[in-house]
Each structure stands twice: as structure tokens, then as C-alpha cells.
Image (tube, rainbow, N blue to C red):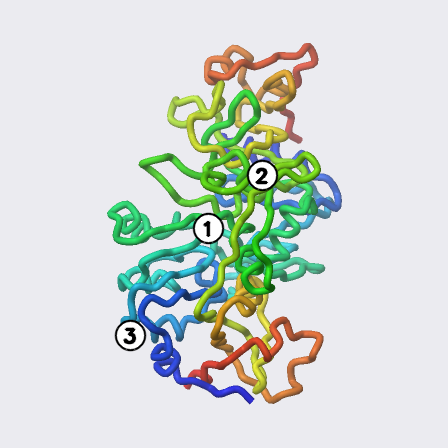
Amino acid sequence: MDAKEIIARRVAQELRAGMLVNLGIGLPSMVASFVPDGLQVFFQAENGVIGLGSRPPEGMEDRDLTDAGGGFVTAVPGAASIDSAMSFGLIRGGHLDMTVLGGLQVDERGHLANWMVPGRMVPGMGGAMDLVTGAKRVVVAMVHSAKGAPKIVPECTLPLTAARRVSLIVTEMAVIEPTDDGLVLRETGPGVSVEDIRAATTATLIVPDDLGRMSFD
Amino acid sequence: MKRALKPEEAAEMIPEGAVLLIGGFMGVGSPHRLIDAIVARGVGGLTLVNNDTCRPGEGVGKLIDAGLVDKAIVSHIGLNPVTQQKMISGEMEVELVPQGTLVERIRAGGVGLGGVLTPTGVGTLVEEGKQVIEIDGRKFLLERPIRGDFALLDARHADCVGNLEYSLTAHNFNPVMALAADTVIAEPHHIMPVGVISPDAVKTPGVLVDYLLERAH
């Protein structure tokens, strides 16, 4: 398993029956491939569909049915198409059970930065600020460090996506839960020690006695 | 009965410096023939309101390529390097707005509200220069309405009185923009006799639509 698959598989374990879930573009969208058999969840794409399905067969794409990254998708039975006001009403209004987003930095307060690098990359926030502000659970799915540079830091140096604390951080090395006391290490990744994680993290980590390990069937 | 405009007639109506609300999310649900006609006419100094600036050579990206847009009010420009270059060089102004805030600002403009209070953006760069209002102990940003001189919409079906029905993820900003401009021009994929679209299926009542684009030949 490569890093991204570890992350996607671990995030998929956070899914519960009946949830409405929004997956961000890129790594987070891989989570859809690892939904446990028989578990019914609805995926929302904020451009306007609840009940996102898999890719259509080649040559059978509907030009009016895409995900938020612009890729062609299908819809599952029970799907609904919605406009942007309804879509973000669901997101901001607390009707979305979980959002999974990528991250550039997360800090000790659980604040996420994922929408711009001043002077270098300004893609815009798209729906990220609404998602982090409004979803019931915010899961950050990202590789632990960027080409050696730590991403889990004492305080974000990049502009924040929201002032709200995220619910969980999942990397290939660790599952970390931001709490009132700080970042609590919940699980270690495959073949990784607490020392390895500490070495790749500049933020202070609290290591509890009941530290777990990621496990996959 | 609405008048059916030729694309070039529609483009002729748009003056230099107009504010255009254009439907679409990465080009899905954008009125492509209208966009092509505006590019062909070459009317400049435009303010573009859209979810994004699409990609170079596609959708509203064509307006950016042609240098017709002075200001873009959008949530995302990450997939359009031309927009980024023009923003950095100062050739074009870009106002980045969280997607859920953008649609609500347009809705406010369309339904007679003086603005919206949203938690999205509190404690981030988006808060700068905005009034923060506390309600029941929670902070909200006052976001101002957006209106356009023209709304240019894409719809799956129109009937002869201008009722519109949309398709899948091609709804996005179209139904909301239909409320928020002085002149509304819709580009339907098909124009049907009155009665074919069920009243229950109408998402934009024809009273909001000033003109339809004539059917494609």
C-alpha cells in the first residue's frame, strides 16, 4: 500500500451508514473506492449532486454530470441534483455529516490551512471555507509532510481556511485528533513508530496510554 | 411568448463595462454559444461573476483569454493559469469569494435582501474589511449583495414563455442568477411548446427570463 492508499483506507473507516459525505478533489476522492461493502453512504459533490457514483463507461459520459473537479461521474439510485444555494445550504447549515479535505498545514489548535500560499499559489478557496465551517465532522486527509517539510506545525504560517478546529487528521503515518489539550496521537501507521512520527512533526503531540495502530482487513 | 435572439443579437445588447452573471461550474451549465458570441463581438471592460474562470479556451475562460474581463468575482481560479497571470500582472482584478458566500450574495441581490450574515470566513483573510456581527454569541460576516446588468444562463429545456428546467450538475448558479440581473438571457438546449415542461419541474419561472437564445442550427 502506498501512502495515499493507507490514508484513503483509514479515512473510509470513519464512514457510518446513512452519512452524507463530501470528498475533496484529489486524495480525498480516493476514499470512495474503499467504502466498506454494504455500507450505504451518500457522497455529495458541491457543484450539485447528492449520490455521486463512479466514473461512467468510456464514451457514455453525460456532459451535465460531473464532480467538483470537473471529472465525469454517474449518480447512484436515490440521487438528487441540486443548485448551488441548496448545496451550500446543506454544507453551511450543518446537514453534511462529514467532509474530507486535503491540507497544506494543520496546527496545534486544529486549524487548517489549505487554500493558498501567498505569492506562490492562489487557487482560491472554492467551497473549502464553507465545508470546514459547516460540516459536522471535518477530516483532513494528507500526506504527513511535504517533501520533508512538516505539515503538522505549532501554528499555521499559511492563511487559515476557517477558525474552526478540525475533527481528525489522517496521514500515512498517524491518526491525530485535535482536542482542547492539543493534538492527541490516536493511531500509528503501518511500520511507523511514535519516534518516527515525532521526527516528522513540529507540533507537540500528546501520546496517550491507549495509543492504537491503524489496522486494515 | 419570449423573443428568440440570435447569438450575435444577444451579444450586441451587452455594453462595454457590463456586469455579467454567467452560470456554470468549470464550464458545466455555462451558456457556451452566448460566450462565443461575446468573444466574437469583443466587448471589453466586463465584470464577470461565475463560480470560477474555467480553463483557458473553455467556457468563461474564453472571455479571460480574449482580455475582455477587467474584474472577476469567483470562488476558484486554480485551473486557469491565464487568470492567475493576469491577476499577478495587474491586468485583471480578481475578488475571491467562498463558494457558498458567492451564491448567497447573488441570491441576496436577487431577492431584495441587504446582505447575508455567514459564519464562513470568520477569522480568515476573507474577514478583512468586513463588518463582524455577533448573534447569540456567534460571529458572522456581513456579506453584501451582488447584482448584474445581465444574467446569461444555460438550461436543458425552455418553453416558449421562458420557463426553465435544468439538468443534473448543470443547475449550479443558474437558478439563483436568474433572479439577480436587470436582463436575463437563457440559452436552452431545447425549446419546447408550452405545457411540455410540467409546472412542478420548472425551476426558473418564465417571468424572470427576458430572452431565449434561438435554437442551435
- Kindly identify which chain the residue marked by label 3 belongs to: B
Can residue A60 be seen in the rendering of this structure?
Answer: no
**On residue A132, which mark appears?**
2
Depth check: B217 or B172 in front?
A: B172
Q: Which residue carries the number 3 mark?
A: B40
Alpha carbons under labels 3 and 2: distance apart: 41 Å
- The reply to whether dot 1 and dot 3 touch (C-beta < 8 Å) is no
**On residue B75, which mark appears?**
1
Q: Residues within 10 Å of mark 1 (few under 14, many from 20)?
A: many
Q: Is residue B61 left or right of residue B108?
A: left
Alpha carbons under labels 1 and 3: distance apart: 26 Å
Residue under disc 3 on the same chain as residue under disc 2? no
Alpha carbons under labels 1 and 2: distance apart: 15 Å
Q: Position of residue A214 (x, y in %)?
A: 62, 24
Q: Secondary structure at mark 2?
A: helix
Can residue A116 be seen in the rendering of this structure?
Answer: yes
Q: Secondary structure at mark 3?
A: helix
- Kindly identify which chain the residue marked by label 1 belongs to: B
Residue under disc 1 on the same chain as residue under disc 3? yes
When the figure is inspected, residue B170 is found, relative to residue B78, above or below; the finding is below
- Amino acid of disc 2: Val
- The reply to whether dot 3 and dot 2 touch (C-beta < 8 Å) is no
Q: Is tag 1's residue or tag 3's residue first in the polypeptide sequence?
A: 3
Q: Is residue B22 left or right of residue B205?
A: left
- Kindly identify which chain the residue marked by label 2 belongs to: A
- Amino acid of disc 1: Ser
Q: Position of residue A212 (x, y in %)?
A: 66, 18
Q: Position of residue A207 (x, y in %)?
A: 62, 12
Q: Residue at x 56, y 89 (%)?
A: B1
Q: Residue at x 38, y 56 (%)?
A: B72
